Amino acid sequence: MKPLPFNIAYFYLFLSVVGGSLTFYFVWLGMQEQNGHFDVVQFVQSTWTSYYAKSLTFDFWTGTTAGTFFMLVEGYRLQMKKMWLFILLTFLIGYAFAFPLFLFFRHKKMNLTPAI
């Protein structure tokens, strides 16, 4: 197999930073609309406002469920420590942050990333 022309682990780390930043940014904008408050009910209700939103919601939950099981199974297989942290980060920050971060540490664990 031909090696990639770039270090994929650090690409995953980059995606984690972008995903976490964008997630936080849009939650912050939503809180500004709510006078500095995070309204969980409105947040959940907004995912059902149209068929397009429903499509994205089901797409997200299906992918997140599969990815979460992958994180757990793969983390167990590789005997990664503190796997609970990735699940917690999924709920506290977002899946777009936690999953690429998991992939970064997975590649480090598998020694697929050369030392810098």
Image (cartoon, rainbow, N blue to C red):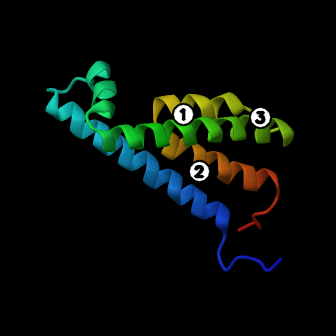
* Residue for badge 3: 81
Number of other residues with Cα within 10 Å of mark 2, as a class: few under 14, some 14 to 19, many 20 or more: many
Q: For the residues carrying marks 3 and 2, which lies nearer the camera in this image?
A: 2
Total marks placed: 3
Mark 2 lies on residue: 100
How packed is label 3: few (under 14 Cα within 10 Å), some, or many (20 or more)?
few
Considering only order in the chain, which callout, 2 or 1, is on the residue closer to the N terminus? 1
Quadrant of the image occupied by residue 65: top right
Residue furthest to the top in view is 41
Q: Mark 3 vs mark 1: which is more N-terminal?
A: 3
Label 3 to label 2, Cα distance in Å?
17 Å
60 vs 102, nearest the viewer: 60
- The tag on residue 89 is 1
Residue type beneath disc 2: Pro
Amino acid carrying label 1: it is: Leu
> In the image, residue 78 lies at what x, y percent?
84, 43
* Residue 94 in view, yes or no: no
Could you tell me residue 112's position as x and y percent?
79, 62
In the image shown, does 95 or 36 lie closer to the viewer? 95
Q: Position of residue 62 (x, y in %)?
A: 55, 38
Q: Position of residue 46 (x, y in %)?
A: 28, 31
Give left or right: position of 79 versus 82.
right
Secondary structure under tag 1 reads helix
**Which amino acid is tagged 3?**
Lys
Q: Residue at x 51, y 36 (%)?
A: 61
